[in-house]
Image: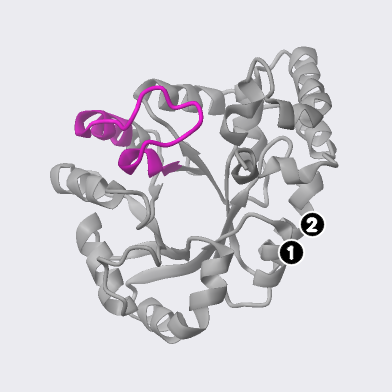
Amino acid sequence: MHHKLILGTVQFGLQYGINNKAGKPNAESVAAMLDLAFQQGVRILDTAEAYGDAQEVIGGYHRTSSYRFEIVTKFSAGRKDLPEELPERVAQDLKTLETDHLYAYMFHSYKDFETYYEGYRADLEALKAQGLIKKIGVSVYTNAELEHLLAYPVDLVQLPFNMLDNWAQRGALIAAAKQKGMEVHTRSVFLQGLFFMESLPEKLKALKPYLDEVAALSKTYKVSLSDIALNYAVQQEHINQVLVGVDTVAQLKQNFESLNRPVPAELLTQIDQIAVKENTLLNPSTWNS
């Protein structure tokens, strides 16, 4: 069973993703994806207050299904329609999601954490003590952010991790987070589809040698790029959960099929050692700027 996968839900509530041709899925399609995920052993959904009506969509599913997911959701300062007071806000999120507690309540970015954590800290601890939140978390992009976070009593960190944004880039810090007792969730396993692009946009051309290296390993070991990409994150012992987002049931099935084909350890070790020097290019939020 695939307990290490978390299903992302941004695409349930927003048109999302550089390669999303399918558009926002309807309720039937969402139900089919969530049923399959649950049947395959997925127990956690990742959502956020900022993901359009994704929380409402999950709540709608919980109302009509006998399956129950644990939920990670994220605080969004931009949601002026939600209560400013944290206990009321979390209560409203729980109601919307049709659940009695959150697996984790996270700050959507390190900047949000810096801005709001001290003010909300007592409320967060109280919500935890009441069992309404199991874990307090932060979503980060950079190593510097993760390093700062290590000084705080945070239970969970979510960060990008993939074949290029890999162990050579982040391993030491992930190990440090684990040593501090933090749970580590990773996202961006396919780097927004970069590994499958036929030709690279001009500004990403510097990544070509590294992508060629990954492609060569794929050939040598006769393992598909998508199998390597997903298993590279899932087979890391220091990573607790790996977040994937899908637009269709077919994509989700492909992910489960990949997980049934584990990747040889020596292949993973070789990917661990690919060291991208132009690492600012590994952050998709810079691609369009």
Kindly identify which residue carries mark 2. 172
Q: Please indicate whether residue 178 sits to the left or right of residue 128 in the image.
A: right
Label 2 crowd bin: few (<14), some (14–19), many (20+), radius 10 Å: few
Q: Is residue 267 visible?
A: no
| Highlighted magenta segment, given as a residue range | 7-35
Residue 96 in which image quadrant: bottom left
* Element on which disc 1 rests: helix
Residue shown at 46%/84% (left/top)? 119
- The disc labelled 2 sits on which kind of residue? Ala
* Element on which disc 2 rests: helix
Vertical position of residue 29 compared to residue 277: above or below: above
Where is residue 141? Give x, y as percent. Answer: 63, 54
The CA span between labels 1 and 2 is 6 Å
Kindly identify which residue carries mark 1. 176
Residue shown at 60%/38% (left/top)? 288
- The disc labelled 1 sits on which kind of residue? Ala
Residue 252 in which image quadrant: top left
- The label shown at residue 217 is none
Where is residue 135? Give x, y as percent. Answer: 46, 68
Q: Nearer the viewer, residue 120 or 243?
A: 120
Q: Are marks 1 and 2 in contact (CB under 8 Å)?
A: yes
Residue shown at 36%/49% (left/top)? 51
- Name the colouring of the figure: one colour
